[in-house]
């Protein structure tokens, strides 16, 4: 018995529809999975400044995990300041799509151009309850319950190098100060500094960072390939 041409045409359309549905389902699933992974488990950050030289070079890329939110001394964290713009649901969705396509490097709706408006990487050098002061761009820390001040380098288990160099006396009032009076951090405050101490903004300029602004720990510098290392 010969197959009716209309039945055959209907069957072709049904097969084609199933294939299109299957492909679209795979694309949507892949997009959702990668978006969830990049937002909840691990996401890349492209470094556009020299604020963390020498440890993190300008132009490098770093993987950050939002799963780790409890800093230890010396950890590098991804931080969002409180003057970040609030985005609508549509803007967040558009950002997710564009960032997915561009491997997290670009987004149409961003942050203000204020000095601390964009997210950034900084090193956590003092924890809640610490007493701190700064001299010659080095932070001195007295942990909560202790009696003596020690330098930030003596207290951390992580080794890191800061970019500190001599500046002319007439430049002392320019840029970020290398001295700071003693203060005590609150129970939910962290003091963060750039490794480039001379030129870059950090807690010396806008104060200690609240715990809810710490969005994830830097785990790995993966680009350029000749500088791959764990933090």
Image (spheres, rainbow, N blue to C red):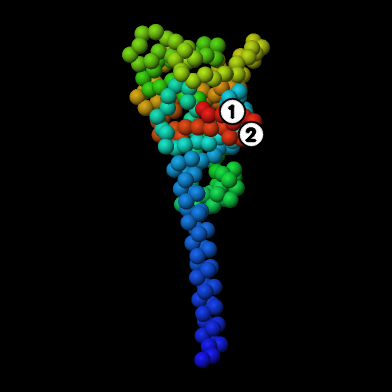
Q: Which residue is found at the position 52% from the left and 11% from the top?
A: 135
- For image coordinates 53% across by 68% down, the residue present is 20
Q: Front-most of 138 and 17?
A: 17
Residue 52 appears anywhere in the view: yes
Residue farthest to the left?
145
Residue 224, numbered circle: 2
The percent position of residue 3, horizontal first and vertical second, equals 53, 88
Give the mark nearer the N terminus: 1 vs 2. Answer: 1
Residue visible at 48% across and 22% down in the picture: 74
Question: Residue 196, percent across and down?
Answer: 59, 22
Image check: 166 left or right of 25?
Answer: right
Q: Position of residue 29 (x, y in %)?
A: 48, 56
Q: Nearer the viewer, residue 134 or 152?
A: 152
Determine which quarter of the picture holds residue 194: top right
Residue of label 1: 56
Q: Dividing the picture into quarters, in which one does residue 46 lie?
A: top right
Q: How far across and down, in percent of the image, does residue 138 sit?
A: 52, 14
Residue 57 versus residue 104 in the image, above or below: above
């Amino acid at each position: 018995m010969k197959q009716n041409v209309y039945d055959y045409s209907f069957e072709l359309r049904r097969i084609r529809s199933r294939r299109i549905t299957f492909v679209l389902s795979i694309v949507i699933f892949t997009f959702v999975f990668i978006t969830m992974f990049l937002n909840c488990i691990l996401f890349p950050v492209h470094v556009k400044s020299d604020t963390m030289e020498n440890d993190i070079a300008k132009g490098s890329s770093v993987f950050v995990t939002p799963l780790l939110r409890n800093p230890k001394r010396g950890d590098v964290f991804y931080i969002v300041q409180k003057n970040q713009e609030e985005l609508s649901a549509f803007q967040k969705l558009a950002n997710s799509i564009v960032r997915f396509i561009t491997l997290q490097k670009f987004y149409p709706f961003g942050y203000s151009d204020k000095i601390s408006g964009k997210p950034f990487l900084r090193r956590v050098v003092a924890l809640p309850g610490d007493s701190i002061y700064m001299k010659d761009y080095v932070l001195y820390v007295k942990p909560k319950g202790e009696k003596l001040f020690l330098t930030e380098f003596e207290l951390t288990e992580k080794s890191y190098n800061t970019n500190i160099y001599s500046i002319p006396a007439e430049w002392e009032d320019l840029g970020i100060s290398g001295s700071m009076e003693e203060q005590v951090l609150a129970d939910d405050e962290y003091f963060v500094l750039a490794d480039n101490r001379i030129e870059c903004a950090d807690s010396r300029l806008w104060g200690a960072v609240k715990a809810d602004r710490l969005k994830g720990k830097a785990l790995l510098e993966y680009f350029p390939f000749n500088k791959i290392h764990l933090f």
